[in-house]
Amino acid sequence: MKFKFILPSLLEAESPFWRPIKYSLFPPLGLATLAAYLPDGDEAVIVDQHVQKLDLDDDPDVVAIQVYITNAKRAYAIADQYRQRGVKVLLGGLHVTALPKEAAKHADVIFTGPAEESFPRFLEDLRQGRMQRVYASQTRSIQKIPPIRRELIQRRLYLVPNSIVVSRGCPHHCEFCYKDAFFKNGRSFYTQQVDDALAEIDRLPGRHLYFLDDHLLGHKRFASDLFNGMKTMGRVFQGAATVDSILDGDLIEKAANAGLRSIFVGFESLDPANLKQSNKNQNLGRDYNRVIERLHDLGIMINGSFVFGLDGDDASVFSRTVDWAVEQGITTSTYHIATPYPGTLFYEKMKKAGRLLTDDWDRYDTRQVVFEPQCMSIDELKNGYDQAYRDFYSWRNVFHGSLAHGTRKHQLKHFFYTSGWKKFEPLWNLAIQMRQLNGMTHLLESVLSKVTGNFKNAAAFNTHTQRTPEMSPDRLSNINSQIT
Ligand code: SF4
């Protein structure tokens, strides 16, 4: 049989003239994971519309489409076209799990929750002629799963072809996170076996890796064994973790010794009331400054994630958050307008309170306001968010953020990484258009190489502690849990 796996894109990701680098970062690992379950003899192709042209004029037997909230409309349109021609269409992913009835109108089969167990069950049913309409995840494990079909991925189209996921989910339960909806009715956090994870790492060429796990330090023993195993592999890597795990024990030191050079940290809010309201208990009462000091002492750059528009936020939140991040020398900031994703408790609360503004899923991209904020207007929230990005990445603040580091080498590293990321987007776009992104990976590896020399968290070096209003600030989004 011929299987076609599709990751539809948002419209803006498809422009032939301008394609933001964020759409060309990671290959669709989830689809490559599912393709690994096909028996020998079946044909498989993966099309990621973020980086490839999608040809609908073909004749696969089965089309499997991964749906997330902002690609849902396009996913459904593609599904409808194939179904009209009698092709069997499967839909799965975060959005399908959150709104199965909506998705089912466009599919022959839907998958809810992670699909490592349900997809092989479906394959067996398909061959036996007893295909069901819905496959809900029953048991959850990623131990002894077949190796990801990486040969189906066109590496040169991605900046980070060596992305990898060694766990699923997260042990926490933040109210605005899609995770609980995706993993409900079963385990919501589990890992591979360490040996399998190390073998997968070993298969990847080059030095750089990006762990797309929601929380790489979430399972202490697993993470510790993984980092011990990686110590001699000569890798440099990036990943994500929570503030409490960075302060806890010596796991973060082990990660640094294994090659961790940059980490995504969900600070989300500087206001304890917001953290409490969001059930972000792992952040409550934690010393954010200490988190940053610890990471910087280990030479780990920080990508801080912040959410704007929670009920404790008024219009002063933007400059306060940006000033703090610059002051602390956070390398890159990712800002989100609070977004009540369907399936989350946040969504239910906003719906009950009559505060939702739209159910146009295209607008649920964390850059637009889709609910009525409590302590500011919709315009204040949108404008403040835009201004926060402009301010954090202003040359002035890139410079000041660099000065938060105590050695010239660290200052330069911060300066080049931050400015390279945001200030040279036209160059990234050129590399995307020329399909030469993979060639930039060496540059990334060099920037992430260990900087030697003692680091002092040197607020004292930063003479400009008084910030001007010019200053201000999440998957990939971690896109890992879109893995179905
Ligand atoms: S927001 Fe982050 S820490 Fe919270 S549940 Fe989601 S993945 Fe876990």
Image (tube, rainbow, N blue to C red):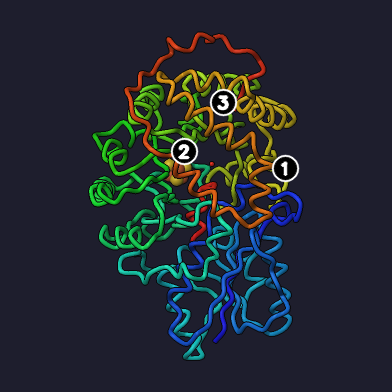
**Residue 103 on image: x %, y %:** 63, 66
Q: Label 3, on which residue?
A: 312
Q: Is residue 173 visible?
A: no
Q: Which mark is residue 26?
A: none
* Quadrant of residue 369 within the rendered picture: top right
User: Which label's residue is closer to the chain start, 2 or 1?
Assistant: 1
Count the labels in the image.
3
Q: Label 1, on which residue?
A: 357
Q: CA distance from mark 3 to mark 1?
A: 19 Å
* Mark 2 surroundings within 10 Å by alpha-carbon count, few (fewer than 14), some (14 through 19), many (20 or more): some
SS category of the residue bearing label 1: loop
Residue closer to the observer: 45 or 317? 45
* Mark 3 surroundings within 10 Å by alpha-carbon count, few (fewer than 14), some (14 through 19), many (20 or more): some
- Look at 64% across and 59% down and name the residue there: 51
Q: Which amino acid type is marked by label 3?
A: Gly
Q: Is residue 340 visible?
A: yes
* Quadrant of residue 95 within the rendered picture: bottom right
Q: Label 2, on which residue?
A: 447
